[in-house]
Amino acid sequence: MNNPISFVPGQYSPAGLDVNGDGQADITLHDLHASMIRRPRGQEVRTLNQYTGYFSTSEGDYPVSVVANSMKEAAKILTMPGVFGQESLEPTMIKYVKGSVAVSVPVHMVGFSTVITPAGAVDSGAYATPEHATVNNGTDVIFSAYEPFGWKFVGWYKGDPDNGGTLISADKISTIDVYDPYSTLVTYYAKYEFQPIIRNGRYMDVSRGWTWEIDTDGYSNYEGRIILRASEIADYYWVITEKRMNADGSGVWVLAPDPTVTQPGGVEGGIKASVAFTPSYIGLNLVFKTIDQNQFTFDTDTICNLRWVGVDNQ
């Protein structure tokens, strides 16, 4: 009896070009070359049974081993063209050999999901697309990440970036090859880091509904300008006469009435103030350290929680 040939569906036999020993090239050099330049499909490990089918030849029974879920499936595989010769032949006998054979088989589809980390970025409005999908293994998919106020996008990771994940791209919009050689489910992470910055633009006081328009890049001969637009109260214009910044992004602004604007009445000489500010996940937290009498009912230690809503369109 001849030595058996190990045959796994979907893969080239390691036995070589002449699979069935008939002297014919069952796998051509062209096929071998194509298999080398073609990207391999993703693989997954499945536990199957081993069966041996015996084919009648002039030299006796010729054994061919296959792996399958059942005897019925093994019979179908053994009659496929190319298993024994180029034609479809039926074995004279099939025997169960053993079970629990681990086999690597191609994965045709792969599912993926997208996770945003850390959770604080989500609370600030970060989002990433697509959230989840199922595609052919090896498909190029466009991923997009939105960078909210106070957060910097770090990159796309395959796997948890805080637990051995691999950086794929640092671009917010990236084309990613959704591919895994072993798994049918992949998790991609959009990683952010908190970036305490002062962003110029319009802020909404979340408690009062008023808007603050803040510009810290300079105004006339001053460090910047702040406009408070309060409902049912005339707008008030401050200039930033002094700006003290700390390494963590916090600091203090010293405010004086804008001398170029006619301010609403209430305090002779205008409203002077100093405010401490701290960047938050959504915008700025302002605390009045000192302030003159004013129509806004601000007092020392008054807190204003501001949410950044966009660039000032004035």
Image (cartoon, grey):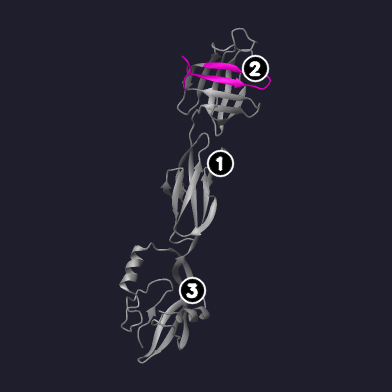
- Residue type at numbered disc 3: Leu
Rendered view: 303 above or below 118: above
Rendered view: 269 above or below 140: above
Q: Where residue 289 appears, x then y in whole percent?
A: 57, 18
Circle 2 Cα neighbour tier, 10 Å, few/some/many (<14 / 14–19 / ≥20): some
Which residue in the structure is indicated by mark 2? 234
Q: Where residue 77 appears, x then y in whole percent?
A: 47, 78
Callout 1–callout 2 Cβ contact below 8 Å: no
Q: CA distance from mark 3 to mark 1?
A: 44 Å
Disc 2, SS = loop
Dividing the image into 4 quarters, which one contains the N terminus? bottom left
Q: Can residue 173 be seen here?
A: yes
| Residue occupying image coordinates x 56% and y 33% | 282
Can you tell which quarter of the image residue 206 is in? top right
Callout 2–callout 3 Cβ contact below 8 Å: no
Q: Earlier in the sequence, mark 3 or mark 1?
A: 3
Q: Nearer the viewer, residue 12 or 1?
A: 12
Q: Report whether 268 appears left or right of 137.
A: right
Q: Where residue 46 appears, x then y in whole percent?
A: 48, 69
Q: Nearer the viewer, mark 3 or mark 1?
A: 1
Which residue in the structure is indicated by mark 1? 122
Q: Can residue 159 be seen here?
A: no
Q: Report whether 251 appears left or right of 56.
A: right
| Residue occupying image coordinates x 60% and y 17% | 236
Q: Where residue 133 appears, x then y in whole percent?
A: 53, 55
Q: Earlier in the sequence, mark 2 or mark 3?
A: 3
- Residue type at numbered disc 1: Val
- Residue type at numbered disc 2: Ala
Range of the magenta residues?
217-239
